[in-house]
Amino acid sequence: MRYIRYLFVGLIVAGLVVVSMANRGPVTLTVLPAPLADLANWNFTIELPLFIVALGFVAVGVLLGYLLEWIRESKHRSEVSKRQRQVKKLHREVTELKAEKNKGKDDVLAILEEAPKRKAS
């Protein structure tokens, strides 16, 4: 299974390298459209190869997807932590009740009483 994953990742990387080599031409990125830039009297431009722009937008999309998924799952994480606190509280209560029940008894007898009972076959 690991080799299939390596093969899949290798094919993706090879495809990205081929697409990147085919799209090395420069493109100019501007922050504002020309009419709005004239109105604001400011515009930032940068010239980059097309493959860097494309891969950058893919990376931003992946990060945004992870962020949105993390936010969506926050209610599940909070529910799990609430349940874990509840289980710890109940475990403490059971331990206290067992100690109270076996108070004053011999330790070995208390352990034997707590052991699960086996049915005779």
Image (cartoon, rainbow, N blue to C red):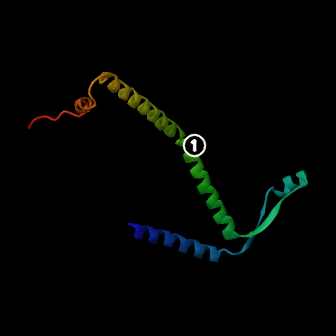
- Label 1: state its secondary structure: helix
- At 40% from the left and 29% from the top, the residue drawn is 92
Q: Is residue 14 left or right of residue 32?
A: left
- At 62% from the left and 61% from the top, the residue drawn is 58
93, above or below 6, in the image: above
Quadrant in the picture for residue 24 = bottom right
Q: How many marks?
A: 1
Question: Where is the C terminus found, in terms of image quarters?
Answer: top left
Q: Is residue 39 left or right of residue 117?
A: right
Toward the viewer: 92 or 84?
Answer: 92
- At 54% from the left and 74% from the top, the residue drawn is 14
Q: Please name the residue that numbered disc 1 is placed on.
A: 71
Which percent across, then down, holds residue 91?
A: 38, 31
Which percent across, then down, holds residue 32?
A: 81, 55
- Residue extending farthest left: 121
Which percent across, then down, holds residue 43?
A: 85, 58
Which percent across, then down, holds residue 57?
A: 65, 60
34, above or below 76, in the image: below
Amino acid type of the residue tagged 1 in the rendering? Ile
- At 64% from the left and 57% from the top, the residue drawn is 60
Q: Is residue 80 left or right of residue 117?
A: right
Q: Is residue 46 left or right of residue 118?
A: right
Quadrant in the picture for residue 111 = top left
Toward the viewer: 52 or 86?
Answer: 86
52, above or below 71, in the image: below
Toward the viewer: 5 or 118?
Answer: 118
Question: Where is the N terminus found, in terms of image quarters?
Answer: bottom left
**Residues packed near mark 1 inside 10 Å, few (<14), some (14 to 19) or many (20 plus):** few
